[in-house]
Amino acid sequence: MRVLVAMSGGVDSSVAAALLVEQGHDVVGATMILWADAGEEGCCSATEVDDARRVCDHLGVDHHVFNFGEDFEAAVVQPYVDAHAAGRTPNPCLACNRHLKFDRFVVRARHLGFDAVATGHYARVVRVGPDDTAVGHYQLRRGVDAAKDQSYVLAVLDQEKLAQVVLPLGGLVKAEVRTKAAELGLRTATKPDSQDVCFITTAGGRDAFLRHRLTLHPGRVVEAETGRALGTVAALELVTVGQRRGMGTGGVGGRRYALAVDVAAGTVAVGSLADLTVDRVALGELTWVDDAVPPATAVGAQCSAHGEAHPAVFDGAGVVFDLPQRNVAPGQTVALYDGDQVLGAGVALPTPLPST
């Protein structure tokens, strides 16, 4: 099988490529240039591209570089900025997987005559049903390494995408991957894991990035229950539902958490931890790995990449938790599971505040 491996310059994609070579596949590595301002370090930097190229040289396979910068700007970066401008908290990693790594990259691979693409994600693609030449039935499952499982960030993939994806690391734990890299003498064996959002630098952070792209607006902090003014925030667009620090209340009346951000009204409504707790989260932009699950289906609802799946019921337009949970910031993804199998995902919508 001809496989095009997405090579980030890190240890995971390096070992993914090495394992496929060992299995006898016709392997080629490819690095995507997504962010033109990467500098000398970090994702898409010259250092990362060079590490990926050298690993490919070590493995005896070809290496390509694809410039998808315009696609990344349109499908990931600008929607990220727009979401913050609307007072929401987006997840750019899922957008990148959906539109770049498992769409634009897959299309390029197909045009170049490859049978499949591979990445270094810790998750599993399992084919079930008859093993014939027709497009089969695929399941997306958690990786066996619970601490590194990345099925959450792949929850937007569907049958068409899964039919073309190979995830060689799904059955391994991280320690095994690093040991394998060291045994093979790969230069990436001891490299640290990359940061979550590749276009947000550690030096400037989200604040500096958004200030460069947006006009940030100060806002009033009001008590959700009474509407009483409590203080101010410097930038409404930087506030996330669930946030406690930086609420500008000076600790008056105990800890308060952001319950809702209304950019148009110029306010952040705050309340207690109990006020932040909800029974239900409405979901939009629902996607399914296979068939849509019917209402009243019991699911596990995972609300962050490294969180746990909370027992819930999908009611057709959201999830109703078995036990109340902290609210999910609008714009964040909620992945739905049946055990370790991913069923689909949706984007959290704003939760209406109780009437005052």
Image (tube, helix red, strand yellow):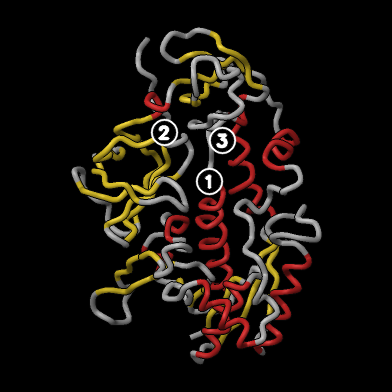
Crowding near the residue tagged with mark 2, few <14, some 14–19, many ≥20 C-alpha atoms within 10 Å:
some
Residue 59 rendering spot, x and y as whole percentages: 65, 87
Secondary structure at badge 1 equals loop
Q: Is residue 76 left or right of residue 287?
A: right
Circle on res. 349? 2
Identify the residue at image location x=77%, y=52%: 37
Q: Amino acid at mark 3?
A: Ala
**In the figure, 200 relative to 214: above or below?**
below
Q: Distance of mark 3 from mark 2, alpha carbons? A: 12 Å
Residue 202 rendering spot, x and y as whole percentages: 72, 48
Q: Amino acid at mark 1?
A: Asn
Residue lying at the far right in this picture: please name it. Answer: 40
Q: Which residue is mark 1?
A: 91
Q: Looking at the image, tell me whether mark 1 or mark 3 is earlier in sequence order.
A: 3
Circle nearer the viewer, 1 or 3: 1
Can residue 142 be seen? yes
Circle on res. 213? none
- Whether pointer 2 and pointer 1 mark residues with C-beta atoms closer than 8 Å, the reply is no
Q: Distance of mark 2 from mark 1, alpha carbons? A: 13 Å
Identify the residue at image location x=57%, y=81%: 179
Number of callouts = 3
Q: Is residue 25 left or right of residue 163?
A: right
Q: Distance of mark 1 from mark 3, alpha carbons? A: 10 Å
Q: Looking at the image, tell me whether mark 3 or mark 2 is earlier in sequence order.
A: 3
Say which quarter of the image contains residue 152. bottom left
Circle on res. 83? 3
Quadrant where the C terminus is found in the figure:
top left
